[in-house]
Image (cartoon, grey):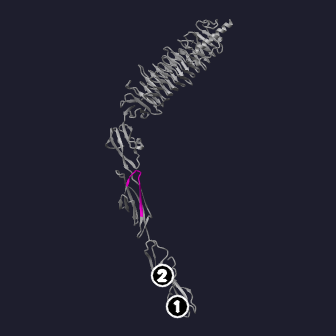
């Protein structure tokens, strides 16, 4: 008998293993069973062996006892845990057995069911289930911890109503709700609370809404910590989360989910969603709102991010809302909306039909689209102090001039700089508590190097901001802009007049620069910078340079303010008189003539230059200028006293001399011997070289 039992158990284990291999999540199912025990909470008996469906045990405790560590429990009838206190299930694999389609566990009353290191497998490849893996109600608590896997059910994994589910770890994956129940991984019904602070809900699907998590009208879902809701899909709304009740995301991520609308989150029919941390990222939708979708629901962004969500055919890639008989309110108070994409760019950040309330300092990157084609008086409402990290870009469907886009609450000061429009031709004008969209005038600036216009927009009644003029439009070698001609807007060959850049713009403008030729750069130099007092001459030379090609110059020469010469090629002038000489030069390119430029040089008068040596004859002395040779300083000699140079003796004559005090000319004479008298005549040939000085 024992051998037969072991043989049957082996066959059963083999058969169960083969059944699980074709499953979509086969790589994540349990290993081949060591021991398989059948459990049927409705028709089983703990007096039975649990070896097959006919001999299923009744209680979980008995099944755990028989299966042991690492064993498998095959459930063929609902296991009710009602007011059972705290129940721990770990170290075991649990699978839907036979053709059983109902809930594996119904947990109610005072029961607290703790799941860790356990697999609850719905065996969807073999059984078309009609109920959850675990249904929690009437005040009970389900705790999902590390190592717990709730998977492969042809229905939602967990249903909770008027009870609490706490998920701190583990995974819920591969479940496919095939009914109109909201939620593919977890369905939160009326009065139910789902707290998710860890773990992952992934790769689930729903026929209706909420591929990952569905929250009914009076249900609540709170997500925080390192939680992740990924890769879930739904046929309708809320690939990651569908909320008809209350959902708040304080941390974690809702990522890579897909739906027809609301790829990440869908808040509908009176539901409320709050993102105060974490991220809604990289979700997709076939239609609108791949990040967050609202239909008669409310959504508040306090912190966290909505990024990288995309749709190929819809609008409102970050947040999309519309009203279908109720009201939709988006409140943006902080956080980041960025990098979301629509195929046509319509409202890639936000697209709304309803109410959008702004306050705080959110980052809103992309276009906020108002659906005024659906609601005529739709607008953005600033309800508190508002200082966005960057201007909010607004747009609508009809582009009516003068339409009110933003209204500030009483007591707030409207600030047009907080907003801009997707089409740059629109400007923002504050009117009371409103910001009105105004069509601006186009100002086209002609850029001559590229022969094209650069266009800018100016609010009516304001002057054009000249800081907007491209530098290349007013940069031309050798020229400067001297004003602007106004051309006909649709025919730039027709000049209408001169435009004053300080004037208020009151029409579309096509402006061309008026060029003026810059003055040349001029220098004037002299060879010596002086002329001799008699017959002197010097040459002064002017140099002119210009950045414009092909210019010619005209020269005018002045001496001491009086015109003395002019012409086209007069670069040099010979001067014979001292004075201040100036050259005035104008340039021309054949059409334009520049303003004159000038340069001056002072020519000094040089006096006579006399040498140190004197010229003389017997009567006079003088000097000649070394430059012009003119004779000056002519005077008679001025002699000093006689000086005996050789005393006379009785037998031999002596000599004496006297010298001109100015030029050094000497007169000599002999002194007779003492026996005679001096001759009184100057001996011939007694001149000597004159001395220098005076």
Q: Is residue 548 magenta?
A: yes
Which segment did they paint magenta?
539-552
Q: Quadrant location of residue 71?
A: top right
Alpha carbon of mark 1 to alpha carbon of mark 2: how far?
Answer: 23 Å
Q: Position of residue 474 (x, y in %)?
A: 40, 45
Q: Position of residue 524 (x, y in %)?
A: 42, 59
Residue at image location 43% in from the left, 76% down from the top: 631
Q: Is residue 655 magenta?
A: no
- State the SS at label 1: loop
- Give the answer, above or below, for where 472 lies relative to 668: above
- Give the answer, above or below, for where 83 lies relative to 478: above
Q: Quadrant location of residue 107?
A: top right
Judging by the rendered image, the residue that carries numbered circle 2 is: 638
- Closer to the chain start, of discs 1 and 2, is 2
- Residue depth check, mark 1 versus mark 2: number of the one nearer the observer: 1
- State the SS at label 2: loop
Q: Nearer the viewer, residue 391 or 447?
A: 447
Q: Nearer the viewer, residue 157 or 416?
A: 157
Judging by the rendered image, the residue that carries numbered circle 1 is: 678
Horizontal side, residue 244 vs residue 488: left or right: right
């Amino acid at each position: 008998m024992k051998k037969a039992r072991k043989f049957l158990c082996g066959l059963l284990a083999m058969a169960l293993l083969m059944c699980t291999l074709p499953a979509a999540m086969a790589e994540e199912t349990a290993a081949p069973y060591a021991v398989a025990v059948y459990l049927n909470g409705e028709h089983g008996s703990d007096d039975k062996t649990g070896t097959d469906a006919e001999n299923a045990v009744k209680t979980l405790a008995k099944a755990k006892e028989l299966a042991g560590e690492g064993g498998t429990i095959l459930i063929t009838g609902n296991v009710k845990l009602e007011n059972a206190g705290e129940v721990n299930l770990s170290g075991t694999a649990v699978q839907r057995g036979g053709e059983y389609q109902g809930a594996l566990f119904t947990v109610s009353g005072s029961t607290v069911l703790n799941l860790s290191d356990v697999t609850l497998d719905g065996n969807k490849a073999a059984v078309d289930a009609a109920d959850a893996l675990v249904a929690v109600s009437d005040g009970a608590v389900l705790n999902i911890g590390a190592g717990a896997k709730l998977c492969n059910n042809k229905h939602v994994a967990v249903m909770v109503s008027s009870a609490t589910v706490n998920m701190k770890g583990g995974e819920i994956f591969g479940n496919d709700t095939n009914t109109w129940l909201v939620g593919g991984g977890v369905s939160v019904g009326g009065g139910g609370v789902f707290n998710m602070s860890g773990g992952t809900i992934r790769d689930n699907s729903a026929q209706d809404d909420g591929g990952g998590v569905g929250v009914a009208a009076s249900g609540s879902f709170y997500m925080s910590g390192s939680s992740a809701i990924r890769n879930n899909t739904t046929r309708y709304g809320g690939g990651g989360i569908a909320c008809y009740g209350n959902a708040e995301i304080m941390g974690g991520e809702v990522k890579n989910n897909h739906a027809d609308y609301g790829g990440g989150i869908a808040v509908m029919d009176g539901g409320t969603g709050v993102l105060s941390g974490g991220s809604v990222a990289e979700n997709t939708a076939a239609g609108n709102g791949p990040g967050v979708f609202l239909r008669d629901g409310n959504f508040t962004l306090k912190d966290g991010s909505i990024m990288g969500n995309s749709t190929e055919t819809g609008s409102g890639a970050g947040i999309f809302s519309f009203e279908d008989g109720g009201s939709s309110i988006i409140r943006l108070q902080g956080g980041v909306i960025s990098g979301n994409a629509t195929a046509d760019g319509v409202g890639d950040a936000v697209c709304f039909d309803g109410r959008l309330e702004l306050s705080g300092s959110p980052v809103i990157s992309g276009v906020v689209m108002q659906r005024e084609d659906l609601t005529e008086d739709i607008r953005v409402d600033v309800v508190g102090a508002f200082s966005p990290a960057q201007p909010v870009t607004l747009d609508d469907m009809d582009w009516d001039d003068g339409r009110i886009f933003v209204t500030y609450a009483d007591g707030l000061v409207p600030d047009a700089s907080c907003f801009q429009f997707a089409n740059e031709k629109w400007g923002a004008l504050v009117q009371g508590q409103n910001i009105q969209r105004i069509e601006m005038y186009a100002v086209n600036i002609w850029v001559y190097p590229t022969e094209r216009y650069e266009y800018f927009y100016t609010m009516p009644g304001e002057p054009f901001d000249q800081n907007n003029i491209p530098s290349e439009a007013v940069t031309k070698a050798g020229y400067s802009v001297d004003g602007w001609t106004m051309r006909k807007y649709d025919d730039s060959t027709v000049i209408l007049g001169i435009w004053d850049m300080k004037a208020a713009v009151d029409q579309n403008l096509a402006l061309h620069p008026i060029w003026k030729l810059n003055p040349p750069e001029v220098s004037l130099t002299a060879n010596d910078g002086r002329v001799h007092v008699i017959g002197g001459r010097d040459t002064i030379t002017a140099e002119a340079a210009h950045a414009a090609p092909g210019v010619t110059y005209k020269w005018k020469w002045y001496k001491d303010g009086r015109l003395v010469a002019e012409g086209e090629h007069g670069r040099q002038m010979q001067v014979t008189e001292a004075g201040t000489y100036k050259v005035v030069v104008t340039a021309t390119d054949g059409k334009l003539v520049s303003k004159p430029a000038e340069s001056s040089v002072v020519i000094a008068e040089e006096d006579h230059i006399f040498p140190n040596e004197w010229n003389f004859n017997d009567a006079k002395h003088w000097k000649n200028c070394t430059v012009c040779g003119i004779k000056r300083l002519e005077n008679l000699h001025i002699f000093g006293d006689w000086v005996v140079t050789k005393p006379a003796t009785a037998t031999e004559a002596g000599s004496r001399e006297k010298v001109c005090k100015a030029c050094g000319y000497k007169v000599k004479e002999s002194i007779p011997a003492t026996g005679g008298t001096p001759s009184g005549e100057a001996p011939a040939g007694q001149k000597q070289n004159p001395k220098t000085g005076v």
